[in-house]
């Protein structure tokens, strides 16, 4: 299942808090990945959590200048939160399977998520040819109560970089 919701600037820190915490990282499979989506597909992007937070608030990666005209406006759309949930049966199978099978299930699950993000990126890139998008994806294999739950939450920032310089 896939769900999409809007993250306003006033809610951006709350939306990211859970995913950037040490507690999230300690959960089974709590991983973070940052992606740059361009005409070449999804590429790993070496961003820190702080740099991503700055970008989500409409600032450059260093947090020193606005790259969005309305940065700081609490009602500005900062990002879209896209959540991919594996079915309960898939999550349970992942948790109970032997390690080799569990790894294969996770590999297929992650590949499916990347396919969805890549499809979204291609559709959005058609609106701004030559630009690139920034995603952050956070994947876990367990819910807060440690019950099996394959889930990836991706944040798609509300700006497009063109030629690596100007943001809009």
Image (cartoon, helix red, strand yellow):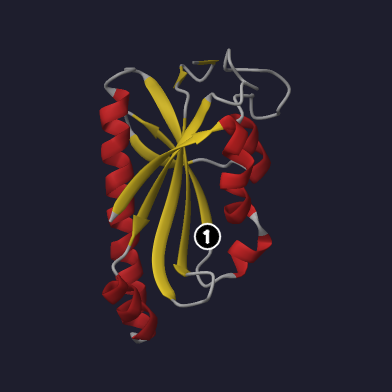
Q: Position of residue 131 (x, y in %)?
A: 39, 21
The vertical placement of 59 against 139, above or below, is: above
Closer to us: 46 or 26: 26
The quarter of the picture where residue 86 lies is bottom left
Q: Where is residue 108 in the image (x, y as percent from the top left)?
A: 28, 64
The vertical placement of 95 against 115, above or below, is: below
Residue that appears at 31% across and 27% down = 124
Let me know if residue 60 appears in the view: yes
Let me know if residue 52 appears in the view: no
Q: Residues within 10 Å of mark 1 (few under 14, many from 20)?
A: some
- Tag 1 secondary structure: strand
Q: Give the residue at mark 1.
A: 31
Closer to us: 90 or 115: 90
- Judge left or right: residue 123 versus residue 21: left
Closer to us: 2 or 111: 2
Q: Position of residue 56 (x, y in %)?
A: 57, 32
């Amino acid at each position: 299942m896939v769900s999409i919701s809007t993250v306003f600037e006033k809610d951006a820190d709350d939306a990211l808090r859970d995913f950037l915490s040490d507690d999230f990282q300690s959960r089974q499979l709590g991983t973070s990945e940052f992606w740059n989506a361009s005409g070449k597909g999804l590429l790993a992007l070496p961003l820190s959590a702080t740099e991503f937070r700055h970008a989500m608030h409409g600032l450059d990666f260093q947090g020193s200048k606005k790259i969005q005209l309305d940065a700081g406006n609490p009602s500005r759309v900062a990002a879209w939160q896209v959540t991919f949930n594996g079915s309960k049966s898939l999550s349970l199978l992942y948790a109970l399977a032997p390690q080799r099978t569990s790894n294969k299930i996770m590999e297929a699950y992650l590949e499916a998520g990347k396919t969805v993000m890549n499809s979204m990126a291609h559709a959005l890139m058609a609106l701004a040819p030559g630009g690139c998008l920034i995603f952050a994806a956070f994947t876990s294999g367990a819910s807060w109560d440690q019950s099996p739950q394959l889930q990836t939450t991706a944040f798609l920032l509300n700006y497009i970089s063109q030629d690596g310089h100007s943001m809009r």
